[in-house]
């Protein structure tokens, strides 16, 4: 019988893989770490434990999105606002 949380875990993996493209140490480094983290927990079958791991993954998503949005904000600010002359 397939685990009903499988789709949620796959969505999490794909989202993290997508966000890892801009990781400072490189996408390949991030991909290797991501795969090892998911493989370490591949035998977990307890739904409560899976929910905790997914929640942890969503926290990591928020942590990865923060620098991305900050960089995006800085680019937009440079584009539309002049820097004060010194």
Image (spheres, grey):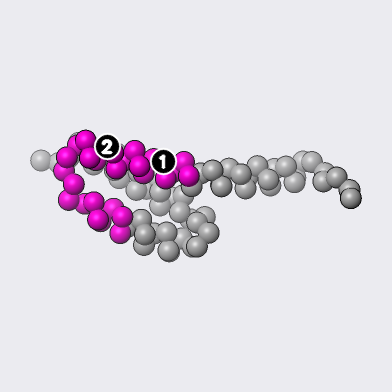
Residue 31 in the image: above or below residue 74: below
Q: Main secondary structure of the magenta part?
A: helix
- Percent x, y of residue 58: 39, 40
Left or right side of 23 for 4? left
Left or right side of 2 for 14? right
Quadrant location, the N terminus: top left
Is the residue marked by circle 2 packed among few (<14), some (14-19), or many (20+) residues within 10 Å?
some
Dot 1 falls on a residue whose secondary structure is helix
Q: Residue furthest right?
A: 86
Is the residue marked by circle 1 packed among few (<14), some (14-19), or many (20+) residues within 10 Å?
few
Residue 14 in the image: above or below residue 33: above
Verify whether residue 49 appears in magenta: yes
In this figure, which residue is indicated by the disc labeled 2?
51
Foreground residue, 14 or 67?
67
In this figure, which residue is indicated by the disc labeled 1?
59
Residue 47 in the image: above or below residue 36: above
Disc nearer the start of the sequence (1/2): 2
Give me the residue at 37% from left, 48% from top: 14
Foreground residue, 30 or 7?
30
Give how far apart the Cα atoms at labels 1 and 2 are: 12 Å
- Percent x, y of residue 4: 20, 36
Give me the residue at 62% from left, 48% from top: 71
Q: What residue range appears in magenta?
A: 36-63
Left or right side of 1 for 30? right
Left or right side of 50 for 26? right
Residue 77 in the image: above or below residue 24: above
Give me the residue at 25% from left, 56% from top: 39
- Percent x, y of residue 74: 68, 45
- Percent x, y of residue 21: 48, 55
Dot 2 falls on a residue whose secondary structure is helix
Give me the residue at 27% from left, 37% from top: 51
């Amino acid at each position: 019988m397939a685990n009903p949380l499988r789709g949620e875990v796959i969505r999490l993996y794909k989202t993290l893989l997508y966000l890892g493209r801009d990781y400072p140490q490189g996408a390949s480094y991030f991909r290797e770490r991501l795969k090892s983290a998911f493989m370490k927990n591949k035998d977990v079958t307890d739904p409560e434990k899976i929910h905790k791991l997914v929640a942890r993954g969503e926290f990591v998503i928020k942590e990865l999105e923060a620098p991305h949005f900050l960089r995006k904000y800085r680019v937009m600010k440079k584009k539309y606002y002049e820097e004060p002359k010194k």
